[in-house]
């Protein structure tokens, strides 16, 4: 599933939509709509000017001149991009949402398996949706103390806690695995038992990894592509994710994989991460 760096990359590719008006919207399937109907979505987007585009957690957020927000969560196979000129056969086949803009470009939400979701929120619903999400790890004022205060308040395993969107926004399986390795923390350790001294290295590791991944335009495991159709580059920098059985880059011990923490694959070095 696209995480913070991948969604950030998608959003950065959409800056040209700001100030454009939606001429026509097509929705191929209703099953990705979350708490809205086809009729409300189409009527809500018809004729609006798109006033901004940003990211919150793993969602792309497009604000409109009608005081509403289109919130897109790309699922495993989802991507949001701007197509200049005529749509390709692939855009038409898998472009679940296609907003034709007044400059001839089309904003496409493409999702082969339709695991993603679309919301259209009014002011009140948007505020409530936002408030339910944890802090942004790359916010300039987000400190190690904030990380400890939010993520450290649960007894869940630290890896699971990092991925809990109510405690911390935007981090999923890949970046949780990577950050815990860099910070030398056992992924199964209960979050509320992480020693005080470990939060600073974890905070630093998380932010550095997320920033580096954004600079590399995200990680491509299978489907994810940037807005220009290229794969991301951060998968080349993985230290643990996808490397089970391979030697730890620090101590040479074979990396261990487990599904016991959260049913997702966790890869770690049992020697370096205690
Ligand atoms: Zn090691």
Image: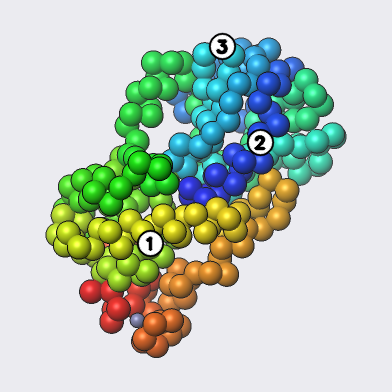
Q: Between marks 3 and 2, how big is the CA–CA gap?
A: 19 Å
Residue 64 in sight from this viewpoint: yes
Task: Report the residue at 52% width, 50% height from top.
Answer: 5
In depth, the one of 185 and 143 nearer the eye is 143
Q: Between marks 1 and 3, how big is the CA–CA gap?
A: 40 Å
Taking the view exactly as shown, the residue that stands out farthest to the bottom is: 252
Which mark is drawn over residue 205?
A: 1
Task: Report the residue at 52% width, 22% height from top.
Answer: 69
Per the image, label 2 sits on a secondary structure element best described as loop
Taking the view exactly as shown, the residue that stands out farthest to the right is: 86
Point out the tag, 1 or 2, that comes first from the N-terminus: 2
**Label 2 sits on residue:** 14
Q: Is residue 256 left or right of residue 49?
A: left
Which mark is drawn over residue 247?
A: none
In depth, the one of 246 and 90 nearer the eye is 246
Contact, mark 1 vs mark 2 (Cβ under 8 Å): no
Contact, mark 1 vs mark 3 (Cβ under 8 Å): no
Point out the tag, 1 or 3, that comes first from the N-terminus: 3
Taking the view exactly as shown, the residue that stands out farthest to the front is: 141
Per the image, label 1 sits on a secondary structure element best described as helix
Q: Position of residue 259 (x, y in %)?
A: 33, 66
Q: Which image quarter: residue 175?
A: bottom left
**Label 3 sits on residue:** 66
- Tell me if residue 168 comes above or below residue 23 in the rendering: below
């Amino acid at each position: 599933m696209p995480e913070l760096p991948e969604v950030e990359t998608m959003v950065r590719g959409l800056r040209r939509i700001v100030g454009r008006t939606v001429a026509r919207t097509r929705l191929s399937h209703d099953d990705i709509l979350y708490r809205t109907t086809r009729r409300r979505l189409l009527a809500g987007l018809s004729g609006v000017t798109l006033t901004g585009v940003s990211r919150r957690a793993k969602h792309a957020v497009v604000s409109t001149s009608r005081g509403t927000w289109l919130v897109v969560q790309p699922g495993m196979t989802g991507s949001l991009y701007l197509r200049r000129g005529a749509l390709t056969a692939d855009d038409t086949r898998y472009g679940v949402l296609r907003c034709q803009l007044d400059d001839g470009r089309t904003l496409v939400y493409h999702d082969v398996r339709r695991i993603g979701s679309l919301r259209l929120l009014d002011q009140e619903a948007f505020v409530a949706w936002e408030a339910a999400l944890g802090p942004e790890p790359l916010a300039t004022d987000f400190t190690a103390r904030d990380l400890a205060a939010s993520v450290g308040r649960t007894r869940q395993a630290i890896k699971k806690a990092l991925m809990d969107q109510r405690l911390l926004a935007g981090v999923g399986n890949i970046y949780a695995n990577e950050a815990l390795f860099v910070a030398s923390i056992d992924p199964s350790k209960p979050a509320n038992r992480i020693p005080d001294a470990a939060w600073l290295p974890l905070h630093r590791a998380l932010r550095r990894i997320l920033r580096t991944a954004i600079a590399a335009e995200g990680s491509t495991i299978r489907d994810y592509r940037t807005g220009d159709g290229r794969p991301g580059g951060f998968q080349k920098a993985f230290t643990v994710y996808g490397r089970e059985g391979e030697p730890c880059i620090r101590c040479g011990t074979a990396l261990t994989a487990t599904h016991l923490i959260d049913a997702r694959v966790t890869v770690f070095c049992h020697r370096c991460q205690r």
